[in-house]
Image (spheres, rainbow, N blue to C red):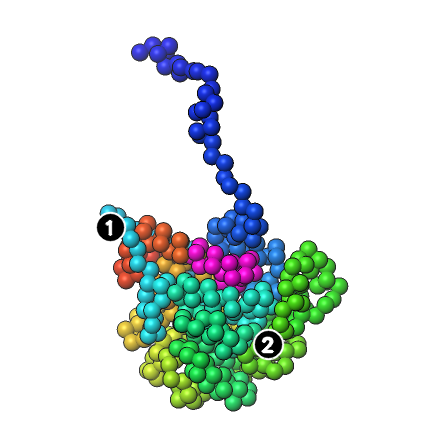
Amino acid sequence: MCEADLVVTRQRPQPAEIFELMRFKKPQLDRKRHRLDSALTIADLRRVAKRRTPAAAFDYTDGAAEEEISLHRARRAFRDIQFNPGILRGVGDVDTSCEIFGGLSALPFGIAPTGFTRLMQTEGETAGATAAAAAGIPFSLSTLGTTSIEDVRRANPHGRIWFQLYVMRDREISYELVRRAAAAGFDTLFFTVDTPVAGARLRDKRNGFSIPPQLTARTVLNAMPRPWWWWDFLTTPKLEFASLSSTGGTVGELLDAAMDPTISFEDLQVIRGLWPGKLVVKGVQSVADARKLTDLGVDGIVLSNHGGRQLDRAPVPFVLLPEVLREVGADTEIALDTGIMSGADIVAAIALGAKFTLVGRAYLYGLMAGGREGVDRMIQILTEEIVRTMKLLGVASLGELTPRHVTLLPASGR
């Protein structure tokens, strides 16, 4: 074959062929829809949220305690894994549903309890509860939520709703919240044990973050590029809390005034007597405590260091999971939160033995990015990532995920 035989034959461009190759995308005139559709990951939603939310409110969500070491370690732990896929498994259809705490969830994650939620974006818990209902996943309401127990149930009349309980200095406040949640048909109570006092949220202190927001020269300057946030805040109903009648002060001051460092196992037994549904202890951070709680007959535990917002340098729940699973996995259900930023993180947690996961910051990033539609987009992103990761691993259901699918690599604070 001579060199001349390799010369490409050229022709004049044919307009018909050019137009056949060109496909013009229909412009998206809805600016909210455009920015949400452009967010392909939870990190993308975070960037949108940061642009649209005043620094104090955004940092309350984004930040953690002291040097934020716990949060960074938790996220690094999810990155420092190796997935081990199988091949030729037949994964045309993937089942992401699971059973947790006596009921079904369409996905292996639910929305975690978050405080002061309407301060992040005015649709607040209503956006989270309705989005969760549409997706068929549980929604958790915090004691420090900004929508009442009854209004959250009205927003989500048929879905699974869980209540996260802090034990207050005035015990009767906590007891009444338990009664109201039971009367409203909440099916699971998260008895939270990692907040006897407020962690040192240094971003909040530096921002002068308070409830309600205080206007200073700094906050006014920061708000000027975000007039929509202040318009929403000033033209919607006043913030109301599930348990606090007084809302003046910094977040740390509010928590320290409300929480009781004398909380004990006796309080757990009192709540057990009041609560008719599933009782789950949230904030477990050791094998010994997991064993004791299981022996006491709780219905489940949540391995959590409160998103790194309480004790800095606390154990990383994802790293702690295998050891806790070996000790109590046959006796109780184990859920997990802290550090989850992708569907792959969730798949890794399920593979290592968690029955369920909770997402807090990811939910709030979506909320700040676009209200209810932003929460829907957050759920969609995580769902697509879960399904894709499962298919690439060669598993067709959550039950097929096992520890052999994940290798924990060195580092990650272990």
Which residue is found at the position 40% from the left and 53% from the top?
384
Q: What distance separates the C-alpha of mark 1 from that of mark 2?
A: 51 Å
Residue 245 appears anywhere in the view: yes
Dividing the picture into quarters, in which one does residue 288 lie?
bottom left
Q: Is residue 380 magenta?
A: yes
Dividing the picture into quarters, in which one does residue 343 lie?
bottom left
Q: Is residue 51 left or right of residue 400?
A: right
Type of residue at label 1?
Answer: Arg
Q: Is residue 391 magenta?
A: no
Which residue is found at the position 41% from the left and 62% from the top?
135
Q: Which quadrant does the C terminus fall into?
A: bottom left
Residue 111 horizontal/vertical position (percent) = 45, 67
Residue 23 horizontal/vertical position (percent) = 47, 34
Tag in front: 1 or 2: 2
Residue positioned most to the right: 217
Residue 203 appears anywhere in the view: no
Which residue is found at the position 73% from the left and 59% from the top?
221
Secondary structure beneath dot 2 equals: loop
Dividing the picture into quarters, in which one does residue 286 lie?
bottom left
Secondary structure beneath dot 1 equals: loop
Q: Which residues are magenta?
A: 363-382
Which residue is found at the position 37% from the left and 81% from the top?
277
Give whichever of discs 1 and 2 has the lower sequence position: 1
The residue at which mark 1 appears reads as 89
Type of residue at label 2?
Answer: Glu
Along the line of sight, the residue nearer the viewer: 260 or 19: 19
The reply to whether dot 1 and dot 2 touch (C-beta < 8 Å) is: no
Q: Which dot marks residue 240?
A: 2
Neighbour class for label 1 at 10 Å: few (<14), some, many (≥20)? few
Magenta span: chief secondary structure: helix
Q: Which quadrant does the N terminus fall into?
A: top left
Along the line of sight, the residue nearer the viewer: 261 or 341: 341
